[in-house]
Amino acid sequence: MTTAQAASSTNGIPPGAPGASPRLYSPDLAPTRRAGRSWGGYHVFTLWGNDVHSLGNYAFALGLFALGMGVWDILAAFVLASLFLFVLLSLSGHMGSKTGVPFPVMSRIAFGVRGAQLPAVIRGGVAVAWFGIQTYLASSVLSALLVTLVPGLRSWERHSVLGLSALGWLSFLTLWLVQVLIVSYGMNVIRKYIAVAAPAVLLTLLALAVWMLAKADWSIAMDAGNPFTGADRVLHVLEAAALWVVIYGTFVLNFCDFTRSAKSNRSVLAGNLVGIPVNMLFFAGIVVVLSGAQFKLNGRVLTNPAEIVQAIPSTFLLVLASLALIVLTVAVNLMANFVAPVYTLVNLFPQKLDFRRAGLVSAVLGLVILPWNLYNSPVVVEYFLGGLGAFLGPVFGIVMADYWLIRRTRVHVPHLYTEDPQASYAYRRGVNPRAVAALVPSAALAVVVAFVPYFSAVAGFSWFIGTLLAGLLYVVLPGRSARPPEDVDGESIAVPSA
């Protein structure tokens, strides 16, 4: 080893990454080599097979029936939403499959090597909160299952510490630890977990829907009474589709965290083409059967699938359905709410944290915020987390406009890791003023549209409004485009991800 190589290795930079800054580079942030990528179309498909069927998603979709939308309206909304998401996720996924870099690094193209910390922290912060909340929701199902199997455990629910019962703490910490262990083994283990979990979950939910349909004499109520009509009906279908896209506003932003492991962009497109419409329409079918059958049986609309599961008379089937919901929520949490903050933390402290350590820090943060108290506070969930989420649409618009319209997908990957003031993404001391100038007003408008009662008629479209405005402003505002003189991939500095 030469003196230069030894010095480079001492700083944590391998000899194959000349010029990379230790403040911007680590093995976990490095672009993945194409030869080492293991995600095919099936893995992208199973990603959607898990992510679509979360407890939160079911609560949202079942709520549409309760609000007055009929079966055909709900199906139409999900068809539209799947088309929107296929386009958005295919555009976003292309960045990862081409460059092999995670979102905190990818956002450097538009925001600069230093300015990219802002969107990464916002995305990671929202994910940490939802990681804790989703773990709490899954732990509620586990607690109900334990009480069913061991009735004596009801005594553990009489007293609480920091707002959670002893049984709640047991269930929460158990699922919390399981997720920490899975993440500690890296992205390959996450890939294997979701590949196994998806078919098991889909089959279990299908069995649950068939059981409900049989219980309702093989027919369902088409609506809950007083359905929407005319223009009001069309508006509610469009708004439901838009809100479903908003739910994935976080995931479309950092989809490259997963597609960086894809064998090719064709794998991403194939997985999206089958995975998004098939899984979402399957999801919509499960929703209308569960809601329509339940309403026919007793005139009630349950907005929590856990309540439906708990009504199953067979203990064996109840255990299977409960375990499926738990496995499902863990899979969703790992993908949507754990990976993003892990990469955010590694990006903030590349020389101190690797994937495993960042996963532990992220999990601890998700615990100490006491997520059950957040979930039980509508003000926190709606205004704080919703307000932060309103920033994600404009960030997506800026990154997409920069990558597709200004650069035409040409990225100088080695320059994403250097602090050289002459590099493509140095901008002004590492921050792109043009991106900031586009982000601030568009995010402010998105927040106003989402929360001010005067705009309630279009509140459901706030994500789209913020995204389109931010992209438009970024394109028309004056500023250095930082379009690289040549398209350079990351193979020259790539090392296998941990």
Image: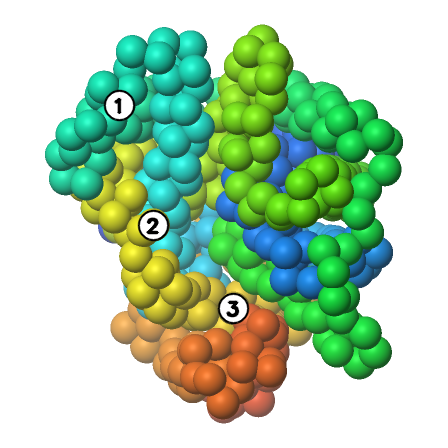
Q: Residues within 10 Å of mark 2 (few under 14, many from 20)?
A: some
Tell me where residue 220 sits by quadrant. Answer: top right
The disc label shown at residue 375, or none? 2
Sort mark 1 into few (<14), some (14-19) or many (20+) by Cα contacts within 10 Å. Answer: many
Question: Is any part of residue 347 visible from this angle?
Answer: no
On residue 308, which mark appears?
none
Label 2: element kind: helix
Determine contact: label 1, label 2, CB under 8 Å: no
**C-alpha span from label 1 to label 2:** 18 Å
Q: Amino acid at mark 1?
A: Leu
Q: Secondary structure at mark 3?
A: helix
Nearest to N terminus: mark 1 or mark 2? 1
| Closer to the eye: label 2 or 3 | 2
The residue drawn where x is 76% and y is 70% is: 228
Q: In front of the other: label 3 or label 1?
A: 1
Give the Cα distance between marks 3 and 1: 38 Å
Q: Are marks 3 and 1 in contact (CB under 8 Å)?
A: no
Q: Secondary structure at mark 1?
A: helix
Return the residue at label 3.
393
The residue under label 3 is which amino acid type? Answer: Gly
Which residue is disc 1 drawn over?
Answer: 167
User: Within 10 angstroms of label 3, few (less than 14), some, or many (20 or more) residues?
Assistant: many
- Whole-percent x and y of residue 248? 57, 54
Percent position (x, y) of residue 25? 33, 45
Q: Nearer the viewer, residue 137 or 13?
A: 137
- Provide residue 398's location: percent of width, then percent of height: 52, 72
